[in-house]
Image (tube, helix red, strand yellow):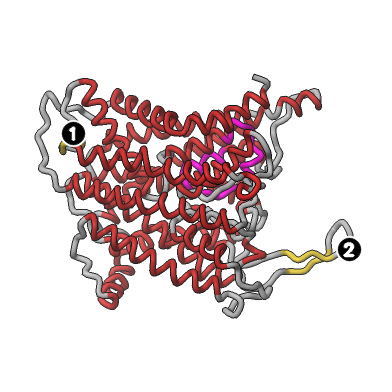
Amino acid sequence: MWQGFFQIALTILIIIVITPFFGGYMARVYQGQTTLLDPVLDPVERIVYRLSGIQAWEDMTGWQYARAVLYSNAVMGLLIFLILMNQSWLPFNPTGLGTPTWDLALHTTISFVTNTNQQHYSGETTLSYFSQFAALGFLMFTSAATGLAVGIAFIRGLTGRPLGNFYVDLFRSITRILLPISIVGAIALISQGIPETLAGPVVVRTLENPDLQQAIALGPVAHFEIIKELGENGGGFFGINSAHPLENPNGFTNLIQIVGMVSIPSSLIYTYGVMVNNRKQAWLVYGMVLAIYIAFVGIVAISEHNGNPAVNALLGSQQPNLEGKEVRFGWAQSALFAVTTTATMCGAVNSMHDSFMPNGGFVQLSNMFLQIIWGGQGTGTAYLFAYLILAVFVTGLMVGRTPEFLGRKIEKREVVLTSFLILLVHPIAILIPAAITMAFPEQLAGISNPGFHGLSQVIYEYTSAAANNGSGFEGLGDATLWWNLSASFSLLVGRYIPIIALLLLADNVSRKQPVPMTSGTLRTDTGLFTGVTAGIILIMGALTFFPVLALGPIAEAFQVFGG
């Protein structure tokens, strides 16, 4: 038991240690300061801007930034859709895979362009190498960079500076952050036995029966795997994702993947502190998020260690819940991975989330409902500070102080945009399609587990889509026309409407005249205000989604534990 918790504590300590270094580096990148890669990349950057006609020195308004995001993502999405629909005759298809159905190709394209990577297919049996690395691998970089750009633009707006140029932020996110780390990470993964090859499957004779043969799928996996985690993409090269031994063979690769998926969103909080020149507030917010994260990890880890009481009673001893888990990871690393992947909106899995105890399902859903622990690539950080704006307004009303954030007044328009972003968009993208699906359970739902867990399966799928996460309670029959199209609705609404609202909110704040701090100003860099913010985050998340939590994992917990 204690060995498992020691592994968890050591991983969290590594994440904390790298935060100021990585966060400071990202602050230098986005503030145009000198980095080690500049001598090599600056000339390339200038050539790209000149050939593409990008006016790198021109700042964008909120609407211009949003349009650039939408236009670029639409063009990329169309290109990738065409690749998927023509993969049967495109190169690097050693097993001769055919073309997926149009609805599956559409869902897959939307899922990857939105940084969600929700998969209604099994990778090695559906998509060719070319589709995987040239189409989906390309989107793993651009979708993650899009989220980073939006998050940085939001931080700039809060400080009163122009939002910047989307194309410059996109390019620098890829060349200064995602690509260099991915190269190093891919080499580390290759050293651990993860394949990186264009050769077809290897046919071997089985150990159990030498007369039988087995085809072992290979592919260009290592580079796909590292950006999958670093970019919080989550889509697996193989059907069972990071539970597959050729995606995640041992404890060291598992550590790389956990640290990879949380390193950028955790460090971005420190980046915020540098850019607004208030590291104290950044560390307070970081501590708030870290405390919730540790609590959630503890809940799931203890629950999985204690196991299922019915199974324990049958065996006559306490056994951890290892259903749906790889023995090489065990209950501790499976619990840590599950909480981290839903906290960061990554969506990769090294165990089957459907097999976790009800406490695990509760935490995984709660992470995706809140979207700020640690949150999605870039956008999660923006969500977090949008909550701070809402907390400033609510607290200011309670104590009779002027609602101000970073020296700028919080007024009606900011509150409307923040409330719309936090309280309306996410529930709409989840609850409306889920209600339609549950109204026709036999025709649409595809539930494999009846009762409370079946409801959780449906809610989880739409929550995962709307939160740009991508993981699922597998067992759900989601490879259908209904699921592909309805989940696509949640993917689009959950991604682009919040991005537009965040950019408009940042643009509006950036245009406000700064006001001097007085005795009536509510300070936001105190422990008390941070605690109030944590309360507002948890209360709003609980109030909005408590009914589905009560009918899903909470009711299932009472059923399993005999409450």
Q: Mark 2 and 1 residues: CB-CB less than 8 Å, in contact?
A: no
Task: Name the residue type under label 1.
Answer: Glu
> Which of the two marks, 2 or 1, is nearer to us in this view?
1
Q: Is residue 354 magenta?
A: yes
* Label drawn at residue 359: none
Vertical placement of 330 versus 534: above or below?
below
Question: Magenta residues, as a range?
Answer: 336-361
Quadrant location of the C terminus in the rendered image: top right
Q: Does label 2 or label 1 sit earlier along the sequence?
A: 2
The magenta stretch spans residue 179:
no
Is 132 positioned to the left or the right of 250 in the image?
left
Q: Would you name the residue on which mark 1 appears?
A: 404
Q: Residue at x 28, y 55 (%)?
A: 30
The label number, if any, that marks residue 210 in the structure image: 2
Q: Is residue 42 above or below residue 260?
A: below
* Count of picture labels: 2
